Amino acid sequence: MTHSCSIIDGKKIAQEIRASLKKQISDMAARPVLAVISVGDDEASRIYVRNKEKAAAEIGMECRSLHFSNTVAEKELLEVIEALNKNESVNGIIIQQPLPCHLKTACLVEAVMPCKDVDGFGPVNLGLLQMNSPEAVIAATPKGVLRLIKSTQVELAGKHAVIIGRSNIVGKPMASLLLNQDCTVTVAHSKTIDLPALVRQADIVVAACGCEKLVKGDWVKDGAVLIDVGINRGSDGRLCGDIDFEALAGRDVWITPVPGGVGPMTVAMLLENTWRAYKNQKNIL
Ligand code: NAD
């Protein structure tokens, strides 16, 4: 397929970040440690956890996987989190989502101490992000999206960014991040009226709704930066995003592919957050 618009190569940028982390970690006497708590037998979660373990190992970071059965009690998980919070050899803690319905995700996420919350999903880090504090641990996917947007060198101040999706882990933190970059931000969601009209005004589009090829070629204005967070199994059985990538071939736009765009950046940003947590905990500048 020919595609002469500008592709933002997330795979390559993520690789460069991982190589830089690997080099920095190799100078350390003790390895950074990321603890991953997972529950149940969700197939996608298993793949995500395996990818994180592999990526961590490749850069010399230790990934301790703690897996629990579908019937685990919330109290037991809270005790595990408390022990990890106290364990000085553990630098980052993440709770793989989704969790089974009997567990209160917010309650568990909140139990992770903010300096080890390397997913940035806890209320303290979300609040710090809202306040544009440099102390905030920023959720990996939105953080990676911002890096991808910045890689285009497009000026952000004053630009209209339309974010499609308002989840706590992507859409909402993304809105705060882009506001902090002086963009004018519109957050669209499933109840938004006339999404095509909004997208037509956008200089930047972050699509994170999980709807196969929702954003059509004729919704997009020339010169736009298009970041596709969505991961969908298309009707042809192949992975595709929330933006109709093929329809934008030959157009004057920047775009991320799926796969090979946001996905690799999410993993790289999680590793970067864990590395930063390690340095903060050890007072390394
Ligand atoms: P979610 O299901 O929690 O939220 C989806 C959001 O999209 C909701 O706010 C909903 O209101 C909105 N939405 C749904 N249909 C819409 C429509 N027709 N028009 C406008 N808005 C609509 O999802 P999420 O966790 O934020 O993830 C979104 C997508 O991004 C999914 O495909 C997910 O797999 C993917 N994802 C990818 C990565 C990555 O690393 N690449 C990370 C996280 C999520």
Image (cartoon, helix red, strand yellow):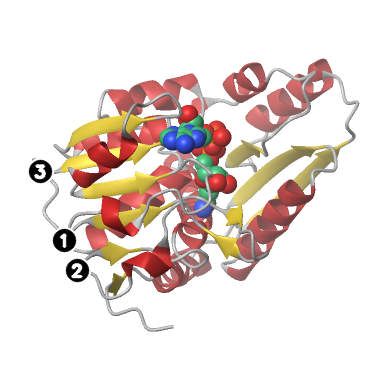
Image coordinates for residue 188, horizontal then vertical, percent: 35, 31
Q: Is residue 212 above or below residue 3?
A: above
Helix, strand or loop at label 2? It is loop
Q: Secondary structure at mark 3?
A: loop
Q: Gap between marks 3 and 1, in whole Å?
A: 15 Å
* Quadrant for the N terminus in the image: bottom left
Residue 53 vs 91, above or below: the answer is: below
Determine the image quadrant of residue 58: bottom right
**Which residue occupies 49% across, 68% down?**
260
- Closer to the camera in the image, 259 or 40: 259
In this view, the residue in front, 224 or 269, is 224
- In the picture, the disc for residue 32 is none
Dot 2, how many residues are within 10 Å of its Cα: few (below 14), some (14-19), or many (20+)? some
Is residue 118 among the parts visible in the rendering?
no
Instruction: Please give left or right for residue 252 compared with residue 45 in the image.
Output: left
Percent x, y for residue 109?
A: 61, 25
Q: Nearer the viewer, mark 3 or mark 1?
A: 1
Residue type marked 3? Ala
Question: Type of residue at label 1?
Answer: Gly
Relative image position of residue 115 (x, y in whole percent): 49, 32
Q: CA distance from mark 1 to mark 2?
A: 5 Å
Of the residues under marks 3 and 2, which one precedes in the sequence?
Answer: 3
Other residues around mark 1 within 10 Å, as few (<14) / some (14–19) / many (≥20): some
Decide if residue 277 is on the left or right side of residue 248: right
| Labelled disc at residue 252 | 2
10 Å neighbourhood of mark 3: few (<14), some, or many (≥20)?
few
Query: Which residue carries the number 1 mark?
Result: 223
Disc 1 is placed on an element classified as loop
Percent position (x, y) of residue 62? 66, 56
Q: Are marks 1 and 2 in contact (CB under 8 Å)?
A: yes
Rounded to the nearest angstrom, the CA distance separating label 3 from label 2 is: 21 Å
Label 3 sits on residue? 157
